[in-house]
Amino acid sequence: MKICVGSKNPSKIRGVEKAFKLLVGDVNTLGFDVKGLIPQPIGLDQIINSAKYRVEKVKELDPECDFYVGIEAGLIELREGRFFDVHVAYIVDREGNVYYGLSPAFEIPRRFVEKILSGEYRELEEIVDSYFGTKNIGETGGFISLLTRKRIIREELIYYSVTTALIPFLNKWLYKNDSLKK
């Protein structure tokens, strides 16, 4: 089974591959470089739209995939000005069925959010790398790995978002009357 991911980020590819291998078996997972994305999606709509954009671009590059996967992390405001990081998996199968999944979310320090909202930084990764002296933290464990002392890594958040997205695919008999076409 050929799985095409709208990213070359190793954390994203490993998380996607792990979910598909455990749920559907042997897979060939390919990452594709996608350009033209907004730097830091804020709000669930922007996060989903960015994940969907990734899928659309990969479909243009390789029309022969069994599944197209877009993973996007972004910030959502819950209450009282508190922002949380969440990963969204947007998956389209060969028949055009669309599946969504979300990762567990975790709170981002307010001062980091303010630096993004003010335009001082374009992405959370830039702030984290600057503050902690890391480089490309989104590819090497993510901010979550620093906050949890490596007990949770970004790859796992991606794994959970993909796994939850595939629930209707794995249980078609239960979801058969629901419209899954985009």
Image: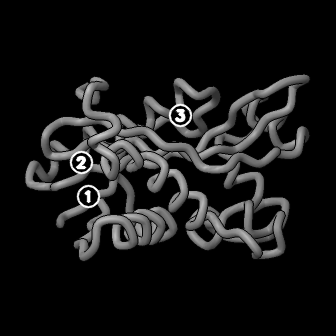
Q: For marks 3 and 1, give the CA distance.
A: 19 Å
Could you tell me residue 149's position as x and y percent? 83, 74
| Residue at image coords 45%, 71% | 14
Local SS, label 3: helix
Relative placement, left or right, of 93 versus 62 is right
Label drawn at residue 48: none
Q: Label 2, on which residue?
A: 58
Query: Looking at the rendering, in which quadrant would you find the N terminus?
Result: bottom left
The mark nearer the N terminus, 2 or 1, is 1
Marks 2 & 3, CB-CB < 8 Å contact = no
> Looking at the image, which is closer to me, 49 or 129?
49
Height in image: 166 above or below 19? above
Q: For marks 2 and 1, give the CA distance.
A: 7 Å
The quarter of the picture where residue 146 lies is: bottom right
Coloring applied to the structure = one colour
Local SS, label 1: strand
Amino acid type shown at disc 3: Ile
Q: Label 1, on which residue?
A: 4
Relative placement, left or right, of 111 versus 61 is right
| Residue at image coords 85%, 24% | 79
Local SS, label 2: helix
Marks 2 & 1, CB-CB < 8 Å contact = yes
> Looking at the image, which is closer to me, 97 or 70?
97
Amino acid type shown at disc 2: Val
Packing grade of label 3 (10 A; few <14, some 14-19, many >=20) is many
